Amino acid sequence: MAVLRTLFQLFKEAFGYKTFSVFKRIMIFKNLVTLYAKSKSATRTVSEVRVQLDGFEIFAYNYSTLIALYRDIFLKQVYQFNTKNDQPFIIDGGANIGMSILYFKRLFPNAEIWAIEPNPTAFTLLQKNIFANQITGVTLFACALSEVEGKIDFYIPAQKGSLNGSVNSNYVPGILSQVDAKRLSDLIGSRKVDVVKMDIEGAENSVIKELYEHHVLGNIDQCILEYHHLNNDQVAYDLFLSYFLANKFECEILAREIGFNGGENIVMHFKK
């Protein structure tokens, strides 16, 4: 009965994605069933998993992380955007294991992408997934985004499969480490950027402020980011929004969920 109930739930989920064709929803159901079956049969001693998914060969450290990324990025399409440029320049801050890169390349095969990831564990799989799928036009940066340049403190989750990490232990508790950091304004310079995707676990406040203060935020056409609303600090939230408003961005709230430590995580899409 439990198996049948799970199959029904997965079928209901797959056919709930109305933006996809019937054939695509059947394939989504098949993918979800395969992932869940593999997750149940996988042993805890397995240090890495490998699956064929939506035409990609994907490496991850566990199925739970992979399923969550597949749902958010490929099914809910939280990073979907439109542009008239068929060769957009995309900066992916917090690229994780590269699922967002694969998604962007499916949308825009000729896109130029900068993938930025400070967690060395996640970066290893990011490299592997880009290489395994022969993805071109991607430059990888093993660093954090920050308001300062150089070495900074960074908290890496003790559990290998937890692939986030943060400069702030209030967002991601973990093992204190040191990683390289770069200012996004220095990386962008005078270039025009079609899209910045950012999921950097609480550092978005300082990074956006740094872009604003160096007059680079206006070089960006669209920004899709996850805002970590720790303790629901309205003053910090309003100040964060003011940087975009000053550069004539409009804001759309894409998703909300309860985050760590009682705060709220808000996925936002800013565009001009």
Image (cartoon, helix red, strand yellow):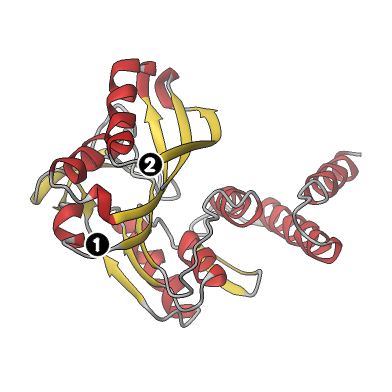
The circle on residue 249 is: 2
Q: Residue at x 20, y 46 (%)?
A: 211
Q: Residue at x 9, y 50 (%)?
A: 151
Left or right, 144 with respect to 83, comes to: left
Calculate the distance from the C-alpha at mark 2 to the C-alpha at mark 1.
29 Å
* Residue 214 shows up from this direction: yes
Query: What element does badge 2 sit on?
Result: loop
Q: Position of residue 40 (x, y in %)?
A: 70, 51
Bin the neighbour count of mark 2 within 10 Å (Cα to Cα): few under 14, some 14-19, many 20 and up.
many
**Foreground residue, 263 or 20?**
20
* Amino acid type shown at disc 1: Ala
**Foreground residue, 44 or 10?**
10
Bin the neighbour count of mark 1 within 10 Å (Cα to Cα): few under 14, some 14-19, many 20 and up.
some
* Amino acid type shown at disc 2: Phe
- Residue 63 lies in what quarter of the image? bottom right
Q: Residue at x 88, y 44 (%)?
A: 8
Give the number of marks: 2
Q: Which residue is mark 1?
A: 142
Q: Residue at x 46, y 70 (%)?
A: 85
Query: What element does badge 1 sit on?
Result: loop
Residue extending furthest toward the left? 150
Q: Quick check: 180 above or below 269?
A: below
Left or right, 208 with respect to 157, comes to: left
Q: Position of residue 73 (x, y in %)?
A: 56, 54
- Classify the position of the N terminus by image quarter: top right
